[in-house]
Every structure is written in C-alpha cells, then in structure tokens.
Amino acid sequence: MRKLPPLNAVRAFEAAARHISFTKAAKELFVTHGAVSKQVASLETWLGTALFNRAQSQLSLTDAGKTFLAAVTPALDRIAITSMQLLEHTEPTALRISAPPTFTMRWLIPRISAFQRKRGGVEVKLTTSTAAVNFEDRIYDVAIRGSNQPIPGMLSVPFMTETIVPVCHPDLMENGQLDYPKLLANHTLISYDTEPMAWSEWLSMASQPDLRVFHSLQFEQMYFALQAAAEGLGVVLVPLFLW
C-alpha cells in the first residue's frame, strides 16, 4: 500500500518552491498566503523535516526541500499532461433527441449551432418521429412532442406555446381574396395527418362551422403541407413559429 503525503500540501509546496514565495504560490493556486503556509507546514510535519529556511525577509529551500522539489515537479507535470491527453480523447457526451420531422427541420436544426458553441463537449444525435414517447427502449434521452397536458409517468417541461394560424402564399390574398374566413370556401384547404388542429375546429372558432369547401389536399407530413402552401396550392393550418 502506497504511503502518500497529503496531495494538496504537495501541490502547495511545489508552487511555493518554484516561486520561492508563499505569496506567488497563493496567487497561482487562488488561495491565501496563510493557506499555503499551513499546507507546507503540514507537509513538513508529515515528512518530519523542514523543506524551507524561513528568514525574516527571505525564503529558501533546504536540501530536503530541493530533493523533494526535484521529484515532485516532474510527477505533477506528468499527471497534468496525461490528464489533458485523456480529456482531449474522451468521447463526447451524447444528447439523443427525438422530435417531429418538420419541427426538427424548421426550428430545431437552425438552433443546433448556437447550442454546440455553448456546449462543445455534447454530441447531438437527432431522430425524427411523431410516435408516442417511450423511454423504455432507451433510444433517446429527450423527446419533443405537442401535448395539451403533461404526459403521465414522465417529466414534462413545457417550453413553447403553439398558436395555430392559417397561412398561404401572398398571391392568394390579393384583392381581398381572404379578408374574411368565409372566403376560404373559394380556396383549397390543405390538411396533414399530424395537424394539431383540424379545419373543422378552426372554422367553428371562426364562426363558420357550416362552411362548404369544394377543394382539399391531404398530406402525411406537415413538411409537405407547408411546401404545398408555399407553392400557392392552398391554405394550411400550422403553428405560427414554424412559418
């Protein structure tokens, strides 16, 4: 079994011995002069010998101090160098995120760069899904989903409120074509399987529950519905932050 001196005391001695100054050692170690003096004194007690000659205005190493310094400095240097080498080659921490495809493309990915600048040691792994959250499979660490209330059995943290609005290409709004909700009857209403609000719900809230619509387009994913609206094919209901 190794019999090692207190390592904090060794570190304090090594700094003081290099500088031949308790004050400079304290500055390097971000501690007080008294703390360095106390650590060195405890090391001398442990070793049973003086490491410094303490005159009133001068500090110098004893022969024992010179011998100890010659052994300690290379050892601490090797520890520091090896530690840095290991830190540089340590596998980065991975953060696995599952989020809906369109949300990932239009909101999450544009913000990844800023996140990585702040958390450079974190490797972000993205998967897209709209399936129910299931952490038992351990496929991801964080899941982003739309929900009206906390999901039972999970830590749910709300971080965004969805405002659902109808959007379209500007050309469809020329000459007052869409000044009133009832004018939607003259346009194609675009829907998608994962929409947070159906057109029937929105029309009811807009006091048009019986509006007859003659043209519609249905997509599986929000991304395609957004693209169709951007091409001027009709009007789609989407969360405002995605538009």
Image (spheres, rainbow, N blue to C red):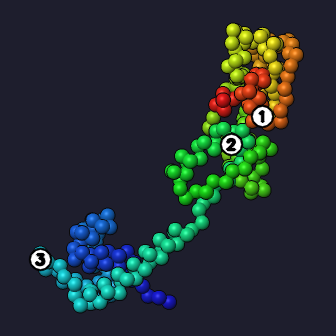
Tell me the quadrant of the picture where the C terminus can be found. Answer: top right
- Distance between the Cα atoms at labels 2 and 3? 69 Å
Q: Quadrant of residue 60?
A: bottom left
Could you tell me how many numbered marks the image carries? 3
Q: Which mark is first along the chain, 3 or 2?
A: 3
In the rendered image, which residue does mark 2 sit on?
Answer: 104
Residue 130 at x, y percent in the picture = 78, 42
Residue 99 at x, y percent in the picture = 71, 44
At horizontal 71% and vertical 27% (from top left) the residue drawn is: 230
Q: Which residue is situated farthest in the left direction here?
A: 56
Front tag of 1 and 2:
1
Q: Is residue 44 above or below residue 178?
A: below
Mark 1 closeness class: few <14, some 14–19, many ≥20 residues within 10 Å: some
Which numbered disc covers residue 56?
3
On the picture, is 115 further left or further right than 53? right
At horizontal 44% and vertical 75% (from top left) the residue drawn is: 81
On the picture, is 31 further left or further right than 156? left
Front tag of 3 and 1:
1
Of residue 39 and residue 92, the one placed in the foreground of this image is 92
At horizontal 32% and vertical 64% (from top left) the residue drawn is: 30
Q: Secondary structure at mark 3?
A: loop
Q: Are marks 2 and 3 in contact (CB under 8 Å)?
A: no
Q: Which mark is first along the chain, 2 or 1?
A: 2
Residue 26 at x, y percent in the picture = 27, 68
The answer to whether residue 242 is seen in the rendering is yes
Q: Which mark is first along the chain, 1 or 3?
A: 3
In the rendered image, which residue does mark 1 sit on?
Answer: 224
Front tag of 2 and 3:
2
The answer to whether residue 161 is seen in the rendering is no
Q: Quadrant of residue 204?
A: top right
Task: Identify which amino acid the numbered label 2 is placed on.
Answer: Thr
- Distance between the Cα atoms at labels 3 and 1? 82 Å
